[in-house]
Amino acid sequence: MLKCFDAAANPYLLIGAVLATGLAGLEAGHSLPPETVGDPAALDTAERLPASLPAAIDAFEKSAVLREALGPELHEAVLAVRRAEAELFAMFTDADVIEAVRWRY
């Protein structure tokens, strides 16, 4: 699955990650899943992408494909930045986070 991304994403890392995971899927013989119709938020939790930054960090950390594609140093650097963001915003509501970063990017 590919989650929509925002303008704050590093375009080089984003494109590299999408290409690396796509190529890994092709090499493993995976095919595309069926089209998702309707509200993706209504999907069973096992079919959904991570719903929070900490959950996304966990998924990123466990990805051998992304670790290999980025290299261990860059992979760890991305993890460090995302963990710092999660810690910074842990006590904020979603509205507070939106207000804090809305015009930053």
Image: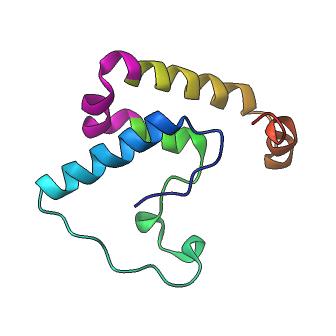
Magenta region's main secondary structure? Answer: helix
Residue 70: quadrant of the picture:
top left
Quarter assignment of residue 13: top left
Q: Is residue 71 left or right of residue 7?
A: left
Q: Residue furthest top?
A: 73
Q: Position of residue 36 (x, y in %)?
A: 45, 79
- Is 65 in the magenta? yes
Q: Is residue 45 above or below residue 90?
A: below
Q: Position of residue 31 (x, y in %)?
A: 21, 69
If the image is split into quadrants, where does the C terminus sit?
top right
The N terminus lies in quadrant: bottom left
Q: Give how far across and how far down residue 7 sits, in percent.
A: 65, 44
Query: Which residues, given as a range, are shown in magenta?
Result: 61-74
- Asked whether 88 or 73 is in front, the reply is 73
Q: Is residue 29 above or below residue 62?
A: below
The front one of 53 and 30 is 30
Residue 19 at x, y = what percent? Answer: 32, 47
